[in-house]
Image (cartoon, coloured by chain):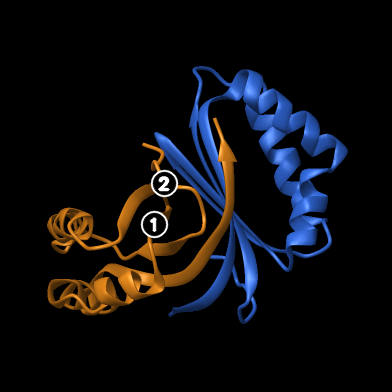
Chain colours: A orange, B blue
Amino acid sequence: MIASTPTPPYYAVIFTSLRTQGDNDYGAMADEMFELAQQQPGYLGFESAREGLGITVSYWRSLEDIKNWKANERHLIAQKTGREKWYEQYKVRICKVERDYGF
Amino acid sequence: MIASTPTPPYYAVIFTSLRTQGDNDYGAMADEMFELAQQQPGYLGFESAREGLGITVSYWRSLEDIKNWKANERHLIAQKTGREKWYEQYKVRICKVERDYGF
């Protein structure tokens, strides 16, 4: 689904990744992180697709909300496990959405 | 591939879409647009994945570069055909990348 986000400005975290081989409990943690992110203050939406390359974009009200989510205890464990087991390579880009349009 | 982008700030265009049924010459135009985008001034990189939802992120040096690419003659035709034939729904978000990290 395309996320229903408010009128800009708001923030986006673009997470681009290449996975390692095998699940290694990735699926269960990904589901948990999706549920948990939705409960965070300032969470606005989420979009994700993987086709070899994985792109996940989450939308947030403020940089402070992004910082708080990054520091979430369960999320810190997921980030550590991601670096150790799940991702061959990844990049996180913190962005300010200045304008949007579409239909 | 994860795009190799320079040190921020730079700009990202997040294009999220749901396709209509059938190719309708989409594939050929998508290939052409990818080639053409790479030749534009200020083009920095490109990431794309579709899994039902399609997410394409292109990276640019400046808002001016994004504006010029949007106004490209062939690209204008692609945008019009996209609205008429290829996309059920889409959203374009113009973003300033303020920070990035990864490995």
Instruction: Indicate the amino acid at tag 1.
Output: Tyr
| Circle number at residue A5 | 2
Q: Taking the image as drawn, is residue B24 in sight? A: no
Marks 1 and 2: CB-CB under 8 Å?
A: yes
Looking at the picture, does residue A76 appear above or below residue A45?
below
Q: Chain of mark 2?
A: A
* Residue B54 at x, y percent in the picture: 47, 40
* Residue A31 at x, y percent in the picture: 17, 53
How many residues crowd mark 1 within 10 Å: few (<14), some (14–19), many (20+)? many
* Residue B86 at x, y percent in the picture: 59, 24
**Residue at the image position 84 percent from the left and 43 percent from the top:** B72
Looking at the picture, does residue B65 appear above or below residue B7?
above
Q: Nearer the viewer, mark 1 or mark 2?
A: 2
Q: Are marks 1 and 2 on the same chain?
A: yes
- Nearest to the observer: residue B8 or residue A29: B8
**Residue at the image position 16 percent from the left and 59 percent from the top:** A36
Apparent side of residue A79 relative to residue A16 in the rendered image (left or right): left
- Nearest to the observer: residue B36 or residue A32: A32
Image quarter for residue A61? bottom left
* Residue B82 at x, y percent in the picture: 65, 27
Chain-order first, disc 1 or disc 2: 2
- Residue position marked by numbered label 1 in the rendering: A59
Apparent side of residue A16 relative to residue B93 in the rendered image (left or right): left
Apparent side of residue B85 relative to residue A25 in the rendered image (left or right): right
